[in-house]
Amino acid sequence: AGDAMQREHVAAAAQGAAVIVHGVNPPGYRNWRGLALPMLENTIAAASASAARVIFPGTVYNFGPDAFPTLTERSPQNPATRKGKIRVEMEQRLAAASRDGVRTLIVRAGDYFGPHPGNSWFAQALVRPGNPVRSILNPGRPEAGHAWAYLPDVAATIAALLDHEAELAAFDVFHFGGHWFEDGVSMAHAIQRVVGEPRPTIRRFPWAVVYAASPFVTVFREMLELRYLWQRPVKLDNAKLVAFLGAEPHTPLDAAVRATLAGLGCLPRQEFSAR
């Protein structure tokens, strides 16, 4: 237990650690600049003191439409949003720290889903945690491809990369392909398959409501800023990762969706206990 804004708390937690996973974000999307950068600086300081490598989960926020549809580790980072600019700044700070001896590994992935996803589009938009799935809110356009990342696969990828620590650069970046869909409704269809009968209906995400409420609700305002990622295809090229590891950890889609829904309490109790 501790406060990521308190440098001494982070340093104490990191004592003796070989790796620090920087998995913190400002709660409710609030005050990114006031919180995200200071928390990262505390992690960098702790990593420097303990000679640990920083693991930084990357996002596609860093990129603007000029880099779409396929993102490689060399794609230009010209973000179109405030959060994207902060994420670029955070990665630049990590790159600078690597030149001072603080090693960093960035694994960039699409939208996360999994049994315990925290804040995610899957858990906060598509379904309602703790409730049977009767309908699915789909935020994407049918013609806009989308990349999803199953969290246990991302974790397995990071662990596999760390097994090759001696071969990693001081500042290394890998893109995780995950589950890529050419259309914007395949994830919703997977949920339908896993839930079975009665088959949940797929409804359009109420972007108009989010827009109307955005001046008054911070989370809605921040969600609206990211809408562009649902309007155009955004795919991560994992060629570098596959060349390095030989293969990317990959759980079959329906198994991943079933585990996710069970972890979120969206399947009947016998379905949950059986797995």
Image: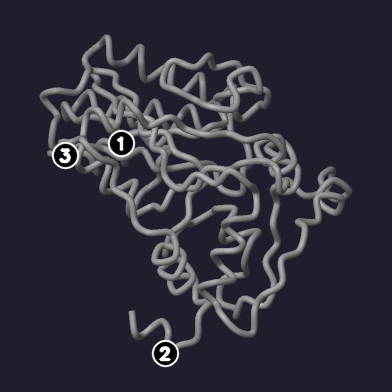
Q: What residue is drawn where x is 43% and y is 29%?
A: 237
141 vs 235: above or below: below
Q: Is residue 141 left or right of residue 209?
A: left
Name the residue tied to disc 2: 270
Residue 137, percent from left and from top: 70, 62
Tag 2 secondary structure: helix
Residue at 59% over, 53% down? 121
Q: Which quadrant would residue 258 be assigned to in this image?
A: bottom left
What kind of element bears circle 1? helix
Badge 3 vs badge 2, beta-carbon distance below 8 Å:
no
Q: Residue furthest bottom?
A: 270
Where is residue 20? Give x, y as percent: 26, 37
* Picture layout, residue 237 above or below residue 257: above
- How far apart marks 2 and 1 lie (CA) works out to 45 Å
Mark closest to the chain's N terminus, 2 or 1: 1
Q: Which residue is mark 1?
A: 8
- Label 3 element class: loop
Which residue: 71% across, 48% down? Answer: 142
In which image quadrant can residue 130 be found? bottom right
The residue carrying mark 3 is 17
- Hey, what amino acid is under mark 3? Ala
Amino acid tagged 2: Gln
Disc nearer the start of the sequence (1/3): 1
Q: Residues within 10 Å of mark 2 (few under 14, many from 20)?
A: few
Of labels 3 and 2, earlier in sequence is 3
